Image (spheres, rainbow, N blue to C red):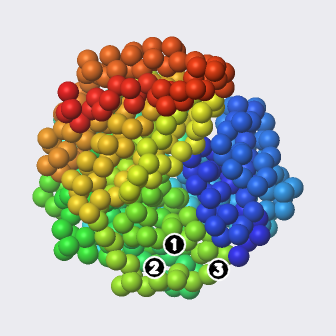
């Protein structure tokens, strides 16, 4: 096992990886930018190295600086987390060339899965269903129109070099085709430096269902079930759950078999996720394969009991998986909500700020993966996700109700979060029914506004908090009656969950 690992990331995932390192007796090295000098991930690691200015390009995305930090610290391996350099094949290659271990698949697999048309071809060759497509459409308007006609309308124009919706256009008629192809190519070129496009038949109102896989260097490939990630806004996942309310045992076996088949064929190593589109007709289609740990990995850990980050470290160190497929017994239901510094009433505008007051939920079956602490200033330079709440319950509704309670207990004063929005998602009848597909937010919560009680509560909480004796200045009166000091939220009583 490694003696020292460098964590090439920040925020909650860097804290998560540092914890897994500690539990395996591995020393962890954090890297940070000037904006993160007091960030929890820096304090949580055994060592910390300043990379440079706040801008990601001069810090977390600077391949040379990250590798130099690993070499200087004596780390044998680098864990990339997710985002930043996690799926950058050039980084993976540079890590290996520097004589270090990249905790993930080989650079060739990172590159191969990063090309969406190549990934599709490998999936199809593995016998996995793919959406009917034109993978290399002609660029002249006649040729393009002809190949679009073969696919049929509505169709989707997609960028070969990247996922996440960039360079994607739905085309509903031949009249829209040329302009959409033109603008998609420009967007793809700007986003990925590669304007290659392909056409796919459009699957209407799909679910996004992904399968977690784990593969070691000894020929073992296993899956850890599926995750339903359809509740998204502009391709940003908001709520994830496992198992999917739309997947029965037969469909689960077919999807997980398909995910393992692709993983085996590409020679996958480590933790990976195979994404599928699931149509209303229960047909599923390969979408892409992510060669990183996903944000939503905690819900898989909660139902399976497998620590995925420890598994990544142990597999990267050459250890065989310590369990067989038939020993994985997923149990219960888990839901994750992402807690982001953004204002849902202002089109989810990022709204970072100082964390003035922080009270995280606790209790049976509640897990908080957090990258913030009271007194920490959330930088404006990075992704607005602050933390994730994940809950486990015997049943889906038990998990849903536990999540509602946990969200209600979560107090973050100082920056706006989407917690009230999340409460309305989880209380929506369509969510309760399990009718969750990728158009859920558009169809049920378009133009969402905070309910009156949310606003009043927030104002009263802030007022009460402002009226409290200054923290640390304990007058004789308050010292005499410490019980009188309560958090503003506690003094408001349980204002949620239909208690008036
Ligand atoms: C699709 C699709 C419908 N038909 N492909 C979204 C980004 C990238 N992951 C692929 N995505 C989609 N591909 C075909 N042929 C619908 C989407 C899609 C989507 C997929 C999963 C989760 C959320 C989504 C939101 C909008 C569109």
Identify the image quadrant of residue 284: bottom left
- Vertically, is 295 above or below 460? below
Q: Calculate the distance from the C-alpha at mark 1 to the C-alpha at mark 3.
A: 14 Å
Visible residue check, residue 88: no
Instruction: Look at discs 2 and 1 and give the one toward the viewer.
Output: 2
| Residue labelled with disc 3 | 318
| Residue labelled with disc 2 | 221
Residue 437 image offset from top left, x and y in percent: 22, 47
Tell me: 308 left or right of 29.
left
Q: Quadrant of the C terminus?
A: top left
Label 1 C-beta lies within 8 Å of the nearest ligand 1 atom: no
Residue drawn at 78 percent across, 41 percent down: 51
Residue 21 image offset from top left, x and y in percent: 66, 64
Q: Calculate the distance from the C-alpha at mark 2 to the C-alpha at mark 1.
A: 8 Å
Visible residue check, residue 470: yes
Mark 2 vs mark 1: which is more N-terminal? 2
Q: Secondary structure at mark 3?
A: loop
């Amino acid at each position: 096992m490694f003696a020292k690992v460098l964590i090439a990331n920040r925020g909650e995932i860097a804290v998560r990886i540092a914890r897994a390192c500690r539990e395996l007796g591995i020393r962890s090295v954090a890297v940070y930018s000037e904006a993160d000098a007091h960030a929890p991930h820096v304090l949580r690691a055994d060592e910390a190295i300043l990379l440079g200015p706040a801008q990601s390009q001069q810090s977390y995305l600077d391949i040379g600086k990250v590798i130099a930090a690993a070499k200087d610290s004596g780390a044998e391996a680098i864990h990339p987390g997710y985002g930043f350099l996690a799926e950058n094949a050039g980084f993976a290659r540079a890590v290996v060339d520097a004589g270090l271990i990249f905790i993930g698949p080989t650079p060739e697999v990172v590159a191969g899965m990063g090309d969406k048309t190549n990934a599709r071809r490998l999936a199809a060759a593995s016998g996995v269903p793919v959406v009917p497509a034109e993978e290399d459409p002609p660029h002249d308007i006649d040729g393009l129109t002809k190949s679009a006609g073969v696919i049929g309308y509505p169709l989707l124009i997609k960028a070969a070099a990247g996922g996440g919706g960039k360079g994607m256009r739905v085309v509903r008629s031949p009249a829209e085709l040329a302009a959409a192809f033109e603008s998609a190519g420009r967007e793809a070129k700007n986003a990925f430096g590669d304007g290659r496009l392909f056409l796919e038949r459009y699957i209407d109102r799909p679910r996004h269902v992904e399968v977690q896989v784990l593969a070691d260097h000894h020929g073992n490939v296993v899956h850890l079930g599926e995750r339903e990630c359809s509740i998204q806004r502009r391709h940003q996942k908001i709520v994830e759950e496992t198992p999917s309310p739309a997947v029965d045992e037969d469909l689960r076996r077919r999807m997980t078999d398909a995910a393992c088949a692709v993983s085996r064929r590409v020679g996958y190593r480590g933790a990976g996720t195979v994404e599928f589109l699931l149509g209303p007709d229960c047909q599923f289609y390969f979408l892409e394969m992510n060669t990183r740990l996903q944000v939503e990995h905690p819900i898989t850990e909660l139902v399976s009991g497998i620590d995925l980050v420890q598994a990544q470290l142990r597999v990267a160190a050459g250890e065989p998986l310590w369990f067989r497929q038939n020993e994985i017994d997923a149990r219960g239901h888990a839901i994750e909500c992402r807690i982001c510094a953004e204002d849902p009433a202002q089109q989810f505008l990022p709204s970072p700020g100082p964390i003035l007051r922080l009270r995280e939920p606790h209790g049976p079956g509640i897990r908080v993966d957090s990258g913030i602490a009271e007194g920490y200033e959330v930088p404006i330079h990075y992704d607005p996700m602050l933390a994730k709440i994940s809950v486990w319950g015997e049943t889906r509704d038990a998990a849903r109700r536990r999540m509602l309670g946990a969200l209600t207990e979560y107090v973050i004063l100082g920056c706006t979060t989407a917690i009230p929005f999340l409460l309305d998602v989880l209380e929506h009848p369509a969510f309760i029914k399990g009718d969750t597909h990728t158009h859920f937010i558009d169809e049920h919560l378009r133009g969402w506004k905070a309910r009156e009680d949310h606003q009043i509560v927030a104002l009263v909480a802030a007022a009460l908090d402002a009226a409290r004796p200054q923290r640390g200045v304990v007058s004789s009166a308050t010292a005499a009656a410490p019980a009188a000091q309560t958090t503003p939220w506690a003094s408001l009583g349980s204002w949620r969950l239909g208690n008036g």
